[in-house]
Image (cartoon, rainbow, N blue to C red):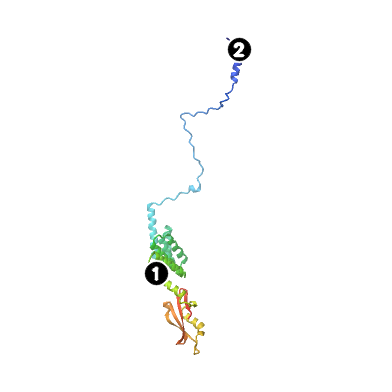
Amino acid sequence: MRLPAALVILLLVSGCDRGAPDNQAATAEPAKAPLDSKPAESKPSESKPTESAKRAKPKDLSAKQASDLAKQFRIELDEGRALTKAGKHEAGIERYHAALAIEPSNPAALAELGWAALQAKQLDLAQGATSRALIFSRKPDQQGMILYNLGRVAEARSDAPQAILHYRESLERRPNKTVQARLDGLLTTASAVAAPAEGLEQIASGVADLGAACKLLADSECANLYTMGEDGCTCRTALGAEREGWALLELGENDTVSNAMWFPAVQTTAGWVVFET
């Protein structure tokens, strides 16, 4: 049966106007790359390097370079010791500084520098270098030597209590006759000055010599001595001497021993100390 022409035209028009189904999204199909093409490689950022990146990193020393530096250190240290032994302390100090420029924390070089500085009376340098040597030292014998040097620096600064402390610490690490003798000398002097006898007080301290001590006694104590004559009193060293570091001063009526007073005196690093009769 043939459909009327008008009906055929109506069916064709309605078919052309029909859209995509409601349950499907109209999307464009992505273009496919050719089979022989390669994926694009991502390139790193081409930003300029920083200043720190431009600086070259220091290279590790070669075995030969390390050996050469060790030899140079030994040369500088040995030259410093030779100069110090010869009494050329300033020149020795320069050589020790050169050695420490190679090995800044070497305890032997620091200790040698401190000793040379002590001989040159550069006490601040001596104190600083020797203290640093003690920090870096790991050997008890070496520590004992360094502590002895610190004691000598303390003595040079007239700090006897600190010197005694260093000498005692030195002996704990390394028994040594020289250190013991130094300590004994300080302890004897300190004991004599601090407590010569119970109830004995000081008349004067820091007196230059025994002659000055005698004049001081004659001026200040003669009035306390009963004298028969008009010549006053005289003072002399009854016992001891300058070289012995102690004395017993006699204040009397000329040469009359029966009418006299005696005053102990002890020599210290700060001068003579004169005690009450």
- Of 267 and 184, nearer the camera is 184
Q: Secondary structure at mark 1?
A: helix
Say if 231 sits above or below 213 in the image: below
Residue 94 picture location, percent across and down:
43, 63
> Label 1 is placed on what type of residue?
Gln
Mark 2 vs mark 1, CA separation in Å = 139 Å
Q: Nearer the viewer, residue 266 or 41?
A: 266
Of helix, strand and loop, which one carries label 2? helix
- Identify the residue at image location x=44%, y=69%: 164
Q: Can you tell which quarter of the image residue 250 is in? A: bottom left
Outermost residue to the front: 198
Identify the residue under disc 1.
Answer: 180
x and y percentages locating residue 35 in the rendered image: 46, 29
Residue 156 shows up from this direction: no
Quadrant of the image occupied by residue 3: top right
Q: Which residue is mark 2?
A: 5
Q: Residue at x 40, y 63 (%)?
A: 143
| Kind of residue at disc 2 | Ala
For image coordinates 39% across by 54% down, the residue present is: 66
Report the disc number at residue 166.
Answer: none
Is 145 above or below relative to 257?
Answer: above
